């Protein structure tokens, strides 16, 4: 019995992880995605799950911005617009104890971070963020290869 409980707990821990740094398969799924708006302007988005904190989602969006710039041959970028469209959901769970004849309601709040950045990239190295430095620092911070 103890082994079964242990395996259930381990399974719950493995399944309840924050959104990984990965490409989203569509714009409403978890992960990052980008859209080219002009030659040097991109929209970068990152959607997290309820286990992803907002700071991590912001960092992942910034990391993807740096990677997009480097992939397109740019050196630096500036954020020209940003938005935090985090969804907050609230749910309630009611229980009734038949022995004590008492009911209890628990309220749970979950946040689903959704970060959007519009960035302008430059090949001249004249904008605010150094793409290579941002990429290296954030990959190191989150132990990404």
Image (spheres, rainbow, N blue to C red):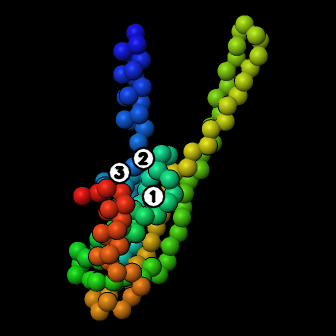
Q: Is residue 31 left or right of residue 54?
A: left
Q: Residue at x 72, y 24 (%)?
A: 104
Q: CA distance from mark 3 to mark 1?
A: 10 Å
Label at residue 35: none
Label at residue 20: 3
Q: Residue at x 40, y 9 (%)?
A: 1
Label 3 close to label 1 by CB (< 8 Å): no
Give the structural element (helix, strand or loop) at label 3: loop
Label 3 vs 1, first from the N-terminus: 3
Q: Residues within 10 Å of mark 1 (few under 14, many from 20)?
A: some
Give the structural element (helix, strand or loop) at label 1: helix
Name the image quarter holding the C terminus. bottom left
Residue furthest to the top: 99
Give the structural element (helix, strand or loop) at label 2: loop
Q: CA distance from mark 3 to mark 2?
A: 6 Å
Label 1 close to label 2 by CB (< 8 Å): yes
Nearest the viewer among 32 and 70 is 70
Horizontal and vertical percent for residue 15?
38, 35
Where is mark 2, residue-wise?
A: 18
Q: CA distance from mark 1 to mark 2?
A: 9 Å
Residue furthest to the right: 101
Horizontal and vertical percent for residue 65?
35, 72
The answer to whether residue 8 is above or below residue 24 is: above
The quadrant in which residue 62 appears is bottom left
Q: Is residue 98 left or right of residue 26?
A: right
Horizontal and vertical percent for residue 121?
34, 83
Label 3 close to label 2 by CB (< 8 Å): yes
The answer to whether residue 56 is above or below residue 136 is: above
Q: Residues within 10 Å of mark 2 (few under 14, many from 20)?
A: some
Where is mark 1, residue-wise?
A: 56
Q: Residues within 10 Å of mark 3 (few under 14, many from 20)?
A: some
């Amino acid at each position: 019995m103890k082994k079964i409980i242990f395996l259930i707990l381990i399974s719950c821990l493995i399944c309840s992880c924050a959104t990984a740094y990965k490409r989203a398969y569509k714009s409403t799924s978890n992960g990052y995605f980008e859209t080219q708006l002009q030659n040097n302007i991109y929209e970068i988005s990152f959607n997290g799950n309820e286990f992803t904190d907002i700071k991590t989602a912001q960092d992942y969006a910034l990391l993807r911005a740096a990677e997009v710039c480097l992939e397109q041959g740019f050196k630096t970028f500036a954020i020209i617009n940003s938005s935090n469209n985090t969804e907050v959901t609230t749910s309630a769970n009611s229980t009734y104890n038949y022995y004590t004849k008492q009911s209890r309601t628990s309220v749970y709040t979950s946040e689903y971070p959704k970060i959007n950045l519009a960035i302008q990239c430059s090949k001249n190295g004249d904008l605010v963020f150094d793409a290579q430095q941002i990429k290296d620092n954030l990959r190191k911070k989150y132990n990404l290869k």
